[in-house]
Image (spheres, grey):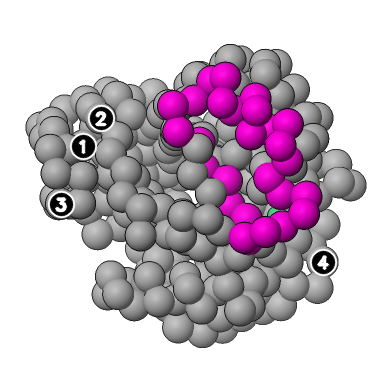
């Protein structure tokens, strides 16, 4: 485990903004051809749940791990890419469709750090904490303003501001910036947490928006979409779910984004960024 990262994680935003623009820009001419410098962000089709793999220069951040049996799809992606170690595993909140597959991941992969914002751990998180101690994985609570590198990309925690009884509205919100491109991951946040995020005044503009709460109707307000101005939106949910995504959310998204991807319909979705442009590969 790389202990020096401990020093890197807190409030490094000003330092990293300076270096983010220093690398060479290589255009995404062939969207299917990934270069070493590309940031890749894969939304894995885990059914109802989230599992998102962010990779650059051999470093990896996993945001949530879905739950069985969907986590098997995530394990396939990790195996196909020869990934046996994660630098960071972010647990956005404790609902089973996000945290349920974490033990399966920990059984197979070395994990340097588990990050979360949970104030009052329940059974699953306690179990993960015990396993982390045995595995030598460090578990850290994160707060808005904390930042950490994934290769040459920078991930910044932009929420939650308050930890409320409602798990969804206590989701860790993350913005990943790479050169001029960025991604915003909304966990299962609903309107309440969206309002806090907007009030906080962070730069939350993003080329790609991971839509909150599987496209549920109580998330993704017009105010949020106006602030983010995404080109693409991704909804992570199973095929043929009654509630997800809500038609009202699809209608709102249609007013703001060029294209909406849905894991349950499109399968795994990978975005590649060269720091200037974002391309998309659906498989
Ligand atoms: Zn969820």
Are the two marked residues, 1 and 4, in contact with CB atoms closer than 8 angstroms?
no
Residue at (40%, 76%) from the top-left corner?
A: 76
Mark 4 CB lies closer than 8 A to ligand 1 = no
Relative horizontal placement of residue 275, taking residue 224 as reference (left or right)? left
Quarter of the image with the C terminus in it = bottom left
> Quarter of the picture for ligand 1?
bottom right
For mark 4, give the secondary structure: loop
Q: Earlier in the sequence, mark 3 or mark 4?
A: 3
Tell me which label, 4 or 2, sits earlier in the chain. 4
Q: Is mark 1 within 8 Å of ligand 1?
A: no
Total count of labels:
4
Q: Label 2: state its secondary structure.
A: loop
Q: Could you tell which of marks 3 and 1 lies nearer the N-terminus?
A: 3
Residue designated by label 3: 33
Return the residue at label 4. 122
Measured in 3D between alpha carbons, the distance from the residue under mark 3 to the one under mark 1, in whole angstroms, is 11 Å
- Label annotation for residue 274: 1
- Establish whether ligand 1 lies closer than 8 Å to the Cβ of label 3: no
């Amino acid at each position: 485990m790389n202990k020096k990262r401990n020093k890197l994680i807190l409030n490094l935003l000003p330092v990293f903004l300076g270096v983010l623009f220093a690398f060479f820009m290589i255009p995404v001419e062939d969207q299917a051809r990934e270069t070493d410098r590309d940031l890749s962000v894969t939304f894995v089709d885990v059914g109802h749940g989230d599992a998102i793999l962010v990779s650059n220069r051999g470093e990896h951040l996993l945001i949530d791990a879905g739950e069985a049996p969907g986590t098997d799809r995530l394990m396939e992606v990790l195996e196909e890419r020869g990934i046996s170690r994660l630098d960071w595993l972010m647990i956005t909140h404790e609902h089973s469709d996000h945290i349920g597959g974490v033990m399966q991941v920990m059984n197979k992969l070395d994990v340097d750090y588990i990050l979360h914002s949970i104030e009052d751990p329940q059974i699953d998180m306690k179990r993960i904490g015990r396993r982390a101690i045995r595995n030598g994985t460090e578990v850290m609570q994160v707060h808005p303003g904390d930042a950490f590198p994934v290769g040459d990309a920078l991930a910044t925690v932009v929420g939650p501001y308050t930890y409320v009884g409602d798990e969804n509205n206590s989701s860790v919100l993350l913005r990943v910036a790479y050169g001029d491109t960025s991604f915003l991951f909304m966990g299962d946040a609903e309107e309440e947490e969206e309002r806090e995020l907007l009030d906080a005044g962070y730069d939350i503009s993003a080329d790609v928006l991971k839509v909150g709460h599987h496209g549920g109707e109580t998330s993704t307000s017009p105010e949020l979409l106006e602030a983010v101005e995404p080109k693409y939106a991704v909804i992570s949910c199973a095929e043929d779910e009654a509630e997800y995504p809500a038609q009202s959310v699809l209608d709102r998204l249609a007013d703001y984004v060029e294209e909406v991807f849905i894991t349950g319909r499109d399968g795994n979705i990978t975005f590649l960024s060269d720091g200037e442009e974002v391309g998309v590969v659906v498989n």
